[in-house]
Image (spheres, helix red, strand yellow):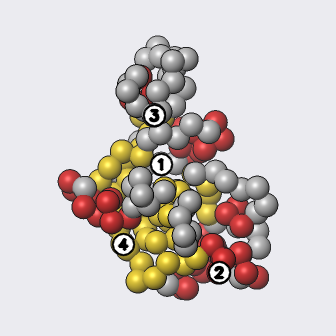
């Protein structure tokens, strides 16, 4: 089992939205960064645990937990011309993008803010707090995961 942090803009899709989905499960699609895609395609596995992170909002931070509830599969939004995530260079025979399903696990009682995470000397090596780290899918070590859970 591995640990991940996945970012979503809460006005697009929030931890509460995930909690209210049928079976508390939703497709995690629309990833259009190759490094993030490679994590989804090559590293993320069924049963992995995810920090759900609200980004591009007034108070960005970790807001809860989800689990990966499917193996990676072809991201169908790449073929939908009406989708923001349409990619005319992707094809069924040679798909560029993948998705996974996420299932709600927990909403935290508070936001563990980006400011708090950046200021914590125990997290200086975390990908999230590294300069220029903007990936929407990023690895989290077991030690980082356990420590951040202790902050909640």
Q: Is residue 135 above or below residue 75?
A: below
Question: Element under label 4?
Answer: strand
Mark 4, residue position: 106
Q: CA distance from mark 1 to mark 3?
A: 26 Å
Q: Can residue 21 be seen from the camera position used here?
A: yes
Residue at 51% across, 24% down? 87
Alpha-carbon span between mark 3 and mark 4: 29 Å
Return the disc, 3 or 2, that comes first in the chain's sequence: 3
Separation of residues labelled 4 and 2 (CA atoms): 20 Å
Q: Is residue 58 left or right of residue 79?
A: right
Label 2: how many Cα within 10 Å (few below 14, some 14–19, many 20+)? few
Using residue 96 as the reference point, say whether residue 129 is left or right of it.
right
Residue at horizontal 55%, vertical 85%? Answer: 151
Q: Pointer 1: what residue?
A: 45
Q: In this figure, which residue is indicated by the disc labeled 3?
A: 84
Q: Residues within 10 Å of mark 3 (few under 14, many from 20)?
A: few
Q: Nearer the viewer, residue 50 or 18?
A: 18
């Amino acid at each position: 089992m591995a640990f991940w942090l996945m970012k979503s803009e809460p006005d697009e899709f929030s931890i509460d939205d995930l909690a209210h989905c049928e079976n508390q499960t939703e497709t995690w699609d629309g990833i259009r960064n190759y490094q993030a895609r490679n994590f989804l395609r090559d590293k993320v596995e069924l049963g992995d645990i995810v920090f759900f992170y609200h980004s591009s909002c007034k108070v960005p931070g970790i807001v809860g937990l989800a689990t990966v509830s499917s193996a990676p599969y072809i991201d169908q939004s790449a073929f939908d011309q009406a989708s923001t995530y349409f990619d005319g260079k992707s094809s069924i025979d040679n798909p560029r993008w993948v998705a996974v399903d996420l299932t709600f696990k927990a909403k935290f009682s508070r936001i563990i803010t980006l400011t708090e995470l950046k200021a914590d000397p125990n997290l200086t090596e975390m990908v999230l707090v590294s300069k220029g780290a903007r990936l929407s899918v990023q690895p989290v070590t077991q030690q980082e995961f356990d420590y951040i859970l202790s902050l909640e």
